[in-house]
Image (cartoon, helix red, strand yellow):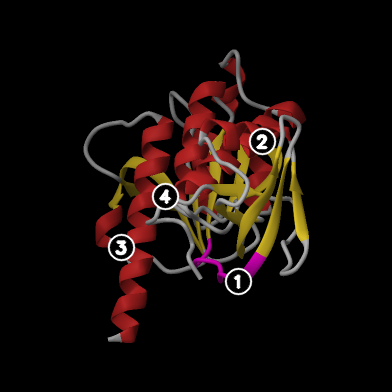
Amino acid sequence: MDDGRSSGVATFFCDEPPQVGRATELGESEAHHARVRRLEKGDRVRLVDGAGTVASGLLARVAKAGVTVDVTDVSHVGPLPPIHLLAPVADRDRMLWLAEKATELGLTSWRGVMWRRSRGVAPRGEGDAFRAKLRVRMIAALTQSGGAWLPAILPDAGADEAVETAKPGVHFLLDVAGEPMLTLPVTPPLTIAVGPEGGLDDEERARLALAGWMPVSLGVTTLRFETAGTAALAIARAALAANVESARG
């Protein structure tokens, strides 16, 4: 099946898993996408549902209010080794930028954390309305990048709750004073915590250390949270891919 990533086939997001032989109806935003791409009836497109289903089909209708796709092929892509992110509640635009890049890198789940220094930021990205914007940005990144899995967006949490409910596995805290990340083994499931602008306070840092979080660094300079989060995810995803190739060899 042609997944569209190398041939320029347009990718659309659908909320329900597409099925062979059934028409998939897509809404106004996807219709706008079709108009921008100058797609016409009969053109082949790609569909993803964010849960591993990848389909191919033909445009049966292109209208201002929506498009219809006749699905011809469906396959399923397994998830990547899990990487979870605790992102700081921070400047809204910069959080959206991080969410976009995290989706391109195959993030498994996202949780916004209200660290103590997050409270001094305005305007900050939090609440249901912001998470809706976050999902829209992630969907756009998913369809552009050719991915098959949309990150799960968990409710915002305070620092204590985020630590207590963190996924099991390896836990990294990004910290310029930590061990270089490239020197450490990366195994899934992995959770990466990114602090706010100005860093964690001493009590938060001690709480994470007590819970077994390992401080890791990305270099000798202090990075903005969106830069640090993106770089750490890229390093982790590359390391996990290398582990898979090594196991195959």
Compared with residue 43, is residue 204 higher up or lower down, i.e. above or below?
A: above
Q: Residues within 10 Å of mark 2 (few under 14, many from 20)?
A: many
Instruction: Calculate the distance from the C-alpha at mark 4 to the C-alpha at mark 3.
Output: 38 Å
Q: Nearer the viewer, mark 3 or mark 1?
A: 1
Q: Which residue is tagged 2?
A: 31
Compared with residue 169, is residue 8 higher up or lower down, i.e. above or below?
A: above
Instruction: Calculate the distance from the C-alpha at mark 1 to the C-alpha at mark 2.
Output: 25 Å
Q: Nearer the viewer, residue 176 or 233?
A: 233
State the SS at label 3: loop
Q: Nearer the viewer, residue 231 or 74?
A: 74
Mark sitting on residue 76: 1
Residue 114 visible in the current orientation: no
Q: Amino acid at mark 2?
A: Ala
Q: Amino acid at mark 1?
A: His
Instruction: Calculate the distance from the C-alpha at mark 4 to the C-alpha at mark 1.
Output: 20 Å
Q: Position of residue 20 (x, y in %)?
A: 71, 69
Q: Residues within 10 Å of mark 4 (few under 14, many from 20)?
A: few
* Residue 78 is one of the magenta-drawn residues: yes
Q: Position of residue 33 (x, y in %)?
A: 58, 35
Q: Residue at x 52, y 22 (%)?
A: 93
Residue bounds of the magenta highlight: 72-82
Q: Amino acid at mark 3?
A: Leu
Instruction: Calculate the distance from the C-alpha at mark 3 to the C-alpha at mark 2.
Output: 46 Å
Instruction: Calculate the distance from the C-alpha at mark 4 to the C-alpha at mark 2.
Output: 17 Å
Q: Which residue is tagged 4?
A: 8
